[in-house]
Image: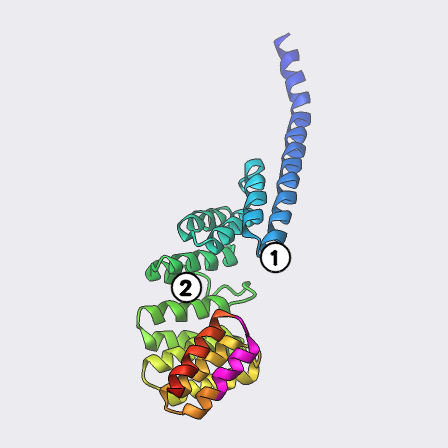
Amino acid sequence: MRNKQILIFFLLMPTFLLSCGANLMETQKQSESYRNLGEAYLAQGNTTAALKELLNAEKIYADDPFLQNDLGLVYLAKNRPEIAIDHFTKATRLKPDYAPAMNNLGTAYMAMKNYDRAISCFEAITNDLLYATPHYPMTNLGIAYYHKKAYDRSEIYFQKALKISPGFTIALKGLAKTQLAQGKTVSAISILEDGVKKAPSSADMLFDLASAYLENRETNKALETFEKVIRLAPSTDLAKEAEIKIRQIRK
C-alpha cells in the first residue's frame, strides 16, 4: 500500500510542478501589465500615476528587476533618493549584470551627495562591453569628481564620454564647467561654442555660454546669447534667470 502511495505521489509530482510553473508565469504576466502601464505614465511625466501602477505590480510579483528599477526612477523623480536607492539595489541583486540599474543607483547616491558610493557604482560598469550607453557612467563619474573638486579626474572622464559620444551635451557642459572651475575661461567658451553648434536648441548650453562670455568680459556676446535663451525657452525659469542677467549687465 505504501509503495502504491509513493508511486502515485511521483506520478502526480510533474503535474504539480507544471501547475506551479504555469501559476508563476501568470503571476509575472499580471505584474508585467501593471509595470507596462506604470512605465507609460512615467514616460509622460505623471509620476504619481506611475507609482500607483508600479506598486500594484510589486504586490503581485516583487522579484522583477525591471520593476524595481522603474520604482527607483519614480522615487528619484519624486526627490526621494533614499527610497530609490533601496529599489535600485534590489534590481541589481536580482540581476547582477543590470548596468542601467547600477548607473541609476549611482545617480541616486549622487542626489544624496554620497559621491564616493556613487563613484563605486559608476566604476563597476564603465568597462561593461555589453552596456549600450557607456558614456552615461563616464559622464556621471565626471560629475561626481567635479563635486569632489577633483577637476583633473573630472576632466578625464568627461573627455572619455565625449570620445564615445561627441555630441553628448551633458558631458560637454560638464567639461566646460570643469574648465571654468580651473580658471580656463577661454577653453570653456570654445567647448560651449562647439556644443551650441552641435545642439543649437539647447537653452541650457546657451545660458552657460552666455555666462562664460560674461565672465570673460565679452558683454555684447553675453547679452546677445542671453536674449537667445529667452527666445528659445520663453516663460521658463531659465528665461527668467537670463532676464535678470540682462538687467544686471545694462545697469
Tell me which residue sits at (63%, 53%) in the image.
40
Q: Is residue 209 left or right of residue 5?
A: left
Query: Residue 233's spot in the image, x, y percent?
Result: 55, 74
- Taking depth in this image into account, of 176 and 66 the one nearest to the observer is 176
Say whether residue 227 is magenta.
yes
The N terminus lies in which quarter of the figure? top right
> Which callout, 1 or 2, points to the residue nearer the camera?
1
Amino acid type, residue under disc 1 in the picture: Gln
Q: Is residue 96 visible?
A: no
Q: Are marks 1 and 2 in contact (CB under 8 Å)?
A: no
The C terminus lies in which quarter of the figure? bottom left
Amino acid type, residue under disc 2 in the picture: Glu
Looking at the rendering, which quadrant does residue 213 occupy? bottom left
Find the magenta span and give its range: 224-235
Residue named by callout 2: 123
The image's mark for residue 171 is: none
Say whether residue 245 is magenta.
no
Q: Is residue 147 left or right of residue 24?
A: left
- Taking depth in this image into account, of 50 and 172 the one nearest to the observer is 50
Query: Residue 201's spot in the image, x, y percent?
Result: 57, 78
Colouring convention used in this rendered image of the protein: rainbow
Q: Earlier in the sequence, mark 1 or mark 2?
A: 1
Q: Is residue 222 visible?
A: yes
Task: From this view, report whether residue 134 is shown above or below residue 162.
Answer: above
Tell me which residue sits at (44%, 75%) in the image.
241
Residue named by callout 1: 44
